[in-house]
Image (spheres, grey):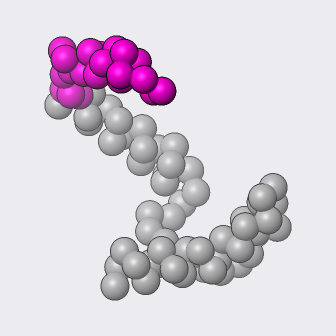
Amino acid sequence: MSNVEQMQDNLSYMKDFNGLTEKEQETLKKAQEEWLVGKHGRKSANECVECGKCEEVCPQHIKIRDELEKIAAELLG
């Protein structure tokens, strides 16, 4: 969006916006459980057993255990 015309064009797509239906939301929730959480056998950042296996194979060399600890502290208090 570098000018008003582009902004108006982008906004026009939201004119007839309809959110997800209940069925679509439920489908999305099930997919998240299956693919984002369920496949790894953990449901929460604080359930990490700190084995380090994820860090060994992380192509970005992220210190995942440290990040999960921060996430757990932030989200779970």
Residue 7 magenta: yes
Residue 8 vs 32, above or below: the answer is above
Residue 39 visible in rendering? yes
Residue 19, percent across and down? 21, 28
Image coords of residue 2 (percent x, y): 48, 27
Would you identify the image quadrant in which residue 22 lies?
A: top left
Q: Is residue 7 left or right of residue 17?
A: right
Name the residue located 35 percent from the left edge and 35 percent from the top edge: 28
Q: Is residue 10 visible?
A: no
Residue 59 in the figure: left or right of residue 14: right
Residue 25 horizontal side relative to residue 63, left or right: left
Q: Quadrant of the C terminus?
A: bottom left
Point 63% across, 80% down: residue = 66
Q: Name the spot of residue 30 as percent of width and height, x first.
A: 36, 40
Tell me if residue 7 comes above or below residue 49 in the rendering. Answer: above
Q: Camera-side residue: 27 or 2? A: 2
In magenta, the rendered stretch is 1-21
Residue 73 horizontal/vertical position (percent)? 43, 83
Above or below 29: residue 45: below
| Location of residue 58 by image quarter | bottom right
Q: Residue at x 64, y 77 (%)?
A: 65
Viewer-nearest residue: 28 or 18: 18
Which residue is pictured at 79% across the width and 65% down the height?
61
- Quadrant placement of the N terminus: top left
